[in-house]
Image (cartoon, rainbow, N blue to C red):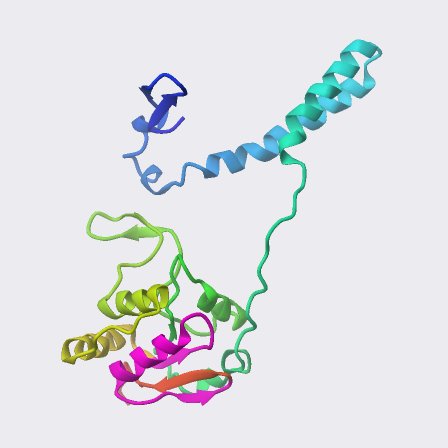
């Protein structure tokens, strides 16, 4: 019952109930498909009650056809192999707390690539560290922009966008004075203490991009490449 309800095979589109609510807070930030997830346990309870009553009835015809109907309804959700991936281990640099040597109070760890809807591994690092460090970026639902509409990611700063493009494309962009100045401004904005790149998908072009942005090679520490940038250090 969303904004538009299409009648299959007719080309007819009717206005849906959600049209009346989508502009109201907080409904503008609600993911409509979540309502289906809420319904699932309710439907499960109804099926369980139906089977319980069918099993207790003495009318054989009702019991037989009732159980056949339940079986037919549940057939589409018969378990099938579910594809899974093995999550990469948390690097020793994070797991052993080595990052603390590079981050002062008020500074952040800047993981590369930064957390986004297409990669959330750095959020796994943060949770493994029991949220002991802060970092820019993330994959979450929050109000964003001047209109405060719902969004899955924060407003991308230039370096956030640049590194994300390298991660998804595998291509090293042209890096000049503008990109270096934007990187310095963004790292200052993020109060970056250290930039961290772990081996993995498109790590080579990401390394080369960081090398050009920061003007030097990274140092291999605890299984990751590290750039000690030390921005945002509080005054003594």
User: Residue 11 lies in what quarter of the image?
Assistant: top left
User: Which of the image's four quarters has the N terminus?
Assistant: top left
**Which residue lies at the image location 37% right of the left edge and 84% below the top edge?**
104
Tell me how many marks there are.
0
Position of 55 compared to 139: left or right? Answer: right
User: Which of the image's four quarters has the C terminus?
Assistant: bottom left
Return the x and y of residue 41 as percentages of the image width and height. 61, 35
User: Residue 133 lies in what quarter of the image?
Assistant: bottom left
The residue closer to the viewer here, 169 or 194, is: 169
Above or below residue 181? Residue 86 is: above
Confirm whether residue 197 shows in the render.
Answer: yes
The residue closer to the viewer here, 235 or 100, is: 100
Confirm whether residue 108 shows in the render.
Answer: no
Above or below residue 180? Residue 88 is: above
Above or below residue 64? Residue 198 is: below
Report the magenta residues as a range: 193-222
The residue closer to the viewer here, 153 or 29, is: 153
Return the x and y of residue 121 as percentages of the image width and height. 47, 66
Q: Is residue 200 magenta?
A: yes
Return the x and y of residue 7 as percentages of the image width and height. 39, 19
**Which residue lies at the image location 71% right of the left edge and 21% below the top edge?**
50
**Which residue lies at the image location 27% right of the left edge and 53% below the top edge?**
144
Return the x and y of residue 225 as percentages of the image width and height. 42, 84
**Which residue lies at the image location 39% right of the left edge and 57% below the top edge?**
117
Position of 11 compared to 120: left or right? Answer: left
């Amino acid at each position: 019952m969303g904004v538009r309800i299409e009648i299959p095979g007719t080309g007819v589109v009717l206005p849906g109930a959600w049209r009346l609510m989508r502009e109201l807070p907080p409904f503008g930030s609600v993911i409509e498909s979540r309502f289906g997830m809420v319904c699932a346990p309710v439907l499960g309870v109804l099926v369980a009650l139906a089977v319980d009553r069918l099993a207790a009835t003495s009318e054989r015809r009702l019991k037989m056809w009732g159980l056949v109907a339940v079986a037919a309804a549940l057939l589409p959700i018969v378990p099938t192999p579910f594809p899974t991936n093995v999550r990469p281990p948390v690097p020793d640099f994070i797991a052993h707390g080595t990052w603390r040597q590079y981050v002062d109070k008020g500074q952040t760890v800047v993981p590369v690539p930064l957390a986004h809807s297409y990669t959330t591994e750095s959020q796994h690092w943060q949770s493994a560290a029991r949220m002991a460090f802060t970092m820019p970026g993330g994959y979450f639902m929050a109000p964003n922009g001047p209109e405060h509409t719902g969004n899955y990611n924060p407003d991308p700063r230039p370096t956030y966008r640049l590194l994300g493009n390298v991660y998804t494309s595998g291509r090293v962009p042209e890096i000049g004075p503008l990109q270096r100045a934007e990187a310095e401004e963004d790292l200052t904005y993020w109060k970056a203490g250290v930039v961290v790149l772990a081996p993995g998908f498109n790590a080579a072009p990401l390394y080369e991009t960081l090398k050009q942005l920061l003007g030097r090679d990274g140092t291999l520490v605890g299984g990751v490449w590290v750039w000690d940038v030390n921005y945002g250090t509080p005054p003594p």
